[in-house]
Image: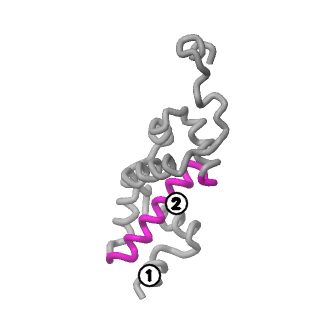
């Protein structure tokens, strides 16, 4: 911090930043996550969007949305899964793979924990 103060004449913005991300920044983070759901979304990659360290990013994201970074990603995955389940008859294993889950059983567990029902039951509810 002293080095930044000497070089730039100011303390870095993140040094005393205890606030939350703006709504616009949360939308940008969500858009990034949504674009990369097909693979593992890493905390370091999300943090790089904001120029913050992974630890600072994680704390600030949790203050902003009330979720840890992994939970935020899983909520985005389940949200996308609900759309896929409602739109078409895609095999559950394909949805799990397309959304970056390690397996269909992992998809089922996360989905059930967040929605209170299995993906198959959700599909039946959404289709009629």
Task: Name the magenta segment's main secondary structure.
Answer: helix
Q: Residue 41 placed where, x, y %?
A: 44, 47
Identify the element where label 2 is drawn.
helix
Q: Judge left or right: residue 83 versus residue 15.
A: left
Q: Residue 101 placed where, x, y %?
A: 44, 57
Q: How many C-alpha atoms fall within 10 Å of the one at disc 2: few (<14), some, or many (≥20)? A: some
**In which quadrant is the C terminus drawn?**
bottom left
Q: Which mark is residue 75?
A: 2
User: Image point 51% across, 50% down: which residue?
Assistant: 26
Q: Is residue 85 magenta?
A: yes
Q: Is the residue 42 above or below the residue 34 in the image?
A: above
The single residue placed furthest to the bottom in the displayed view is 128
**In which quadrant is the N terminus drawn?**
top right
Look at mark 1 in the image and give the residue it sits on: 126
Disc on the earlier residue, 2 or 1: 2
Q: How many C-alpha atoms fall within 10 Å of the one at disc 1: few (<14), some, or many (≥20)? A: few
User: Image point 53% across, 63% down: which residue?
Assistant: 110
Q: How is the image coloured?
A: one colour
Front position in the image: 40 or 28: 28
The alpha-carbon separation of the residues under discs 2 and 1 comes to 18 Å
The single residue placed furthest to the front in the displayed view is 9
Q: Residue 88 placed where, x, y %?
A: 32, 76
User: Image point 61% across, 45% down: which residue?
Assistant: 20
Q: State yes or no: discs 2 and 1 in contact (Cβ < 8 Å).
A: no
Q: Please provide the residue range marked out in magenta.
A: 65-89
Q: Residue 97 placed where, x, y %?
A: 37, 60
Identify the element where label 1 is drawn.
helix
């Amino acid at each position: 911090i002293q080095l930044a103060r000497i070089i730039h004449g100011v303390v870095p913005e993140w040094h005393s930043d205890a606030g939350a991300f703006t709504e616009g920044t949360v939308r940008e983070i969500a858009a990034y996550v949504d674009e990369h759901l097909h693979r593992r979304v890493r905390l370091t990659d999300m943090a790089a969007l904001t120029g913050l360290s992974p630890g600072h990013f994680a704390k600030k994201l949790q203050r902003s949305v009330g979720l840890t970074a992994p939970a935020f990603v899983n909520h985005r995955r389940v949200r996308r899964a609900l759309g896929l389940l409602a739109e078409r008859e895609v095999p559950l294993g394909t949805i799990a793979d397309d959304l970056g889950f390690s397996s269909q059983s992992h998809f089922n567990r996360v989905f059930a924990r967040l929605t209170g029902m299995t993906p198959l039951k959700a599909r039946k509810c959404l289709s009629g």
